[in-house]
Image (tube, grey):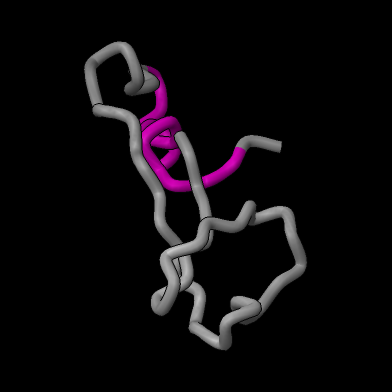
Amino acid sequence: MTIKYVCSKCKKFYDTKEPIFKCKCGGMLDLEYFPIKLSNENIIKDNWSLFRYIKALPLEQA
């Protein structure tokens, strides 16, 4: 899964690991992510909590 910041004004992309709050052009940053498609292989079968879908959530794995 890819997670990036994108400027709402100039459309420049920034990595989420960069400590940035505003684009250099003055635009606000939006969080954009491209999730993986959810399939049966991505669902943890023996876990009945929300975490069975962890691979489909927009979270970076530590």
Q: Is residue 43 left or right of residue 28?
A: left
Quadrant showing the N terminus: top left
Residue visible at 59% across and 42% down in the picture:
60
Percent from the top left, x then y, of residue 20?
71, 72
Q: Nearer the viewer, residue 54 or 12?
A: 12
In this rendering, the answer to whether 36 lies above or below 13 is above
Point out the residue furthest to the bottom here. Answer: 26
The span picked out in magenta is: 46-60
Q: Is residue 57 left or right of residue 26?
A: left
Percent from the top left, x then y, of residue 48?
34, 33
Residue visible at 50% across and 74% down in the picture:
29
Quadrant showing the C terminus: top right
In this rendering, the answer to whether 62 lies above or below 58 is above
In this rendering, the answer to whether 17 lies above or below 48 is below
Percent from the top left, x then y, of residue 59?
52, 46
Percent from the top left, x then y, of residue 19?
76, 67
Residue visible at 25% across and 28% down in the picture:
37
Residue 43 visible to the viewer: yes
In this rendering, the answer to whether 13 lies above or below 58 is below
Q: Nearer the viewer, residue 48 or 32?
A: 32
Residue visible at 44% across and 47% down in the picture:
58
Residue 50 visible to the viewer: no
Q: Nearer the viewer, residue 3 or 26?
A: 26
Q: Is residue 40 left or right of residue 25?
A: left
Task: Say if the magenta span includes residue 31.
Answer: no
Task: Say if the magenta span includes residue 50.
Answer: yes
Count the labels in the image: 0
Point out the residue furthest to the right here. Answer: 19
